Every structure is written in structure tokens, then in C-alpha cells.
């Protein structure tokens, strides 16, 4: 595990005990709980072939999904990649330069997920540059297209800009649960109940060309993700 890399912005990080508790113990316990839960689930994938083909062809992909489906999204990325020099590669997510961002990054690190530092607010342009750089360095991306704070199920333009600048393929994806708890959060986060059936559905991959109309692609992506969300809400298993 790497060291804490919090940008304080006037807020104290805390002493050694606080740092250990908040950025080591809590992420470890959270990751252990999610992994334990995932072992009880029965997972299947739909529309996976085109994504496998892109990875086999050494193309970069951007898994694009709504924030409320985040908890089990690692199930959507079963790949292990390496850079030409042999360095480990895989999927990267955007993580804010804050305490919450550090906790999130430390948690996902237990799943082999890399954190790209940045925010979707006042430093949005900087975050975009960092995501583009990560793709060019060989990372795939996982982006909550309505995150980190909403509005819920409203696609923002960052994912389209990354595709247009890098040629990476956007892959709409949704994870459906046979049975789940709905949290009282801004996104109505879903957490599957143990032993549920889970379905990962992938949409058709697409690229935004260099001169492409990002707004048209944004609307199309939002429409597809909304349709996936409707499918996932109606999923009750396939006994």
C-alpha cells in the first residue's frame, strides 16, 4: 500500500493514529467486507465478447456507468494487463484530492484498482488531463458518469472528452442485482444482498472521433444507460 497522498486544502490530516485508522484500517475492513460479499454472489456477464476482443487487441476501454452501481463494478473488469515494459496495468478510477478521496483510493487499491487524482469541480480540467495521461500510459478507466455528486443519472462530458482525445472505447455497463439494499445516499446506492444473482451487462463499445459532436454522444450514452437502468431495476434472477 502506498503512502497517504492527501492534499490538505487547509484541513488537518490528523495524527498517526487517525491516519492509520481512517486511511488504512477503514479501507481494509471495507474492502474485506465487499470481497466477502462478492464471494457469495452468482455472477454472469452479457455482451462481454466485444469488450474481450478490444482488450485482446490491446485497445483501451472506458467502462462507463451510473454511480449507484459502483459497489460491485469490479465484477465488470476481470482483466489483468501489463505495459510494454512489463509494469502492471489494469483499470483506473478518478479519486478526489481529499480525505474522502484518499479513503476511496485506499479501499479500491485492495482490488488492484489504480487511483487518478483529481476532482470534477474546480479542478475538472486538471482531472481530465490526468485521465488522458493515464490512458496513454496503458490504463483502462472506470468512470461514474454522473459522479461524484450528481445530479443522479445525468451523464457528464468528461468521459467523451477522454475518448475523443485518446481513441479509447467507451463501454456502457450496468450491474443488476436479484436482491439489494438501497442506501439513503444522493445516488440511492445499491448493495447486493448475500447469495444474490448478479448480471453484468455491457453495451456496444464506441469511440468519439476527433471531430465528433460530444453532446450527441453524451445524449446517446445517457439514453443507453437509462435503458440499462430500467433493465436492472426489473431484474429478479433467471431461475
Image (cartoon, rainbow, N blue to C red):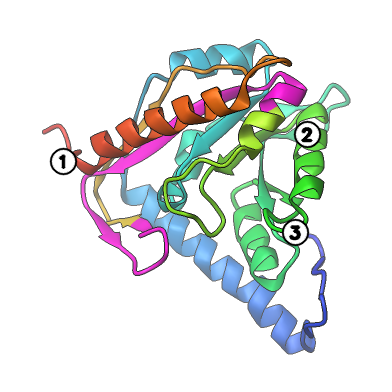
Q: Which residues are magenta?
A: 163-190
Which residue is located at x 67 percent, y 58 percent? 105
Q: Is residue 75 left or right of residue 120?
A: left
Which residue in the protein does label 3 denote? 122
Which residue is located at x 20 percent, y 38 percent? 235
Which residue is located at x 40 percent, y 33 percent? 225
Which residue in the protein does label 2 denote? 132
Please say whether residue 4 is one of the residues in the magenta stretch: no
Label 3 to label 2, Cα distance in Å?
A: 18 Å
Please say whether residue 181 is one of the residues in the magenta stretch: yes
**SS assignment at label 2:** helix
Q: Residue 138 appears at what percent x and percent y?
A: 77, 28
**SS assignment at label 3:** loop
Which residue is located at x 44 percent, y 63 percent? 33
Query: Could you say which disc has been placed on residue 164 in the image?
Result: none
Q: Is residue 118 left or right of residue 192?
A: right
Establish if 42 lies above or below 98. Answer: above
Q: Mark 1 or 3, which is nearer the eye?
A: 3
Amino acid at each position: 500500500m502506498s503512502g497517504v497522498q492527501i492534499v490538505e486544502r487547509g484541513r488537518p490530516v490528523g495524527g498517526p493514529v487517525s491516519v492509520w485508522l481512517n486511511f488504512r484500517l477503514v479501507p481494509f475492513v471495507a474492502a474485506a467486507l465487499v470481497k466477502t460479499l462478492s464471494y457469495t454472489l452468482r455472477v454472469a456477464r452479457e455482451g462481454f465478447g466485444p469488450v474481450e476482443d478490444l482488450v485482446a487487441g490491446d485497445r483501451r476501454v472506458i467502462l462507463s456507468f451510473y454511480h449507484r452501481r459502483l459497489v460491485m463494478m469490479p465484477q465488470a473488469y476481470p482483466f489483468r494487463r501489463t505495459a510494454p515494459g512489463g509494469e502492471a496495468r489494469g483499470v483506473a478510477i478518478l479519486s478526489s484530492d481529499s480525505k474522502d478521496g484518499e479513503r476511496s483510493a485506499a479501499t479500491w487499491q485492495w482490488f488492484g484498482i489504480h487511483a487518478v487524482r483529481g476532482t470534477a469541480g474546480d479542478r475538472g480540467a486538471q482531472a481530465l488531463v490526468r485521465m488522458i495521461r493515464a490512458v496513454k500510459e496503458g490504463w483502462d478507466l472506470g468512470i461514474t458518469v454522473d459522479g461524484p455528486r450528481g445530479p443522479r443519472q445525468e451523464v457528464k462530458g468528461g468521459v467523451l472528452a477522454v475518448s475523443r482525445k485518446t481513441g479509447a472505447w467507451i463501454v456502457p455497463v450496468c450491474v443488476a442485482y436479484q436482491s439489494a439494499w438501497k442506501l439513503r445516499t444522493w445516488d440511492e446506492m445499491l448493495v447486493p444482498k448475500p447469495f444474490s444473482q448478479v448480471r453484468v451487462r455491457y453495451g456496444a463499445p464506441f469511440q468519439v472521433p476527433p471531430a465528433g459532436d460530444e453532446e450527441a454522444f453524451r445524449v446517446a450514452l445517457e439514453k443507453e444507460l437509462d435503458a440499462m437502468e430500467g433493465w436492472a431495476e426489473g431484474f429478479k434472477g433467471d431461475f
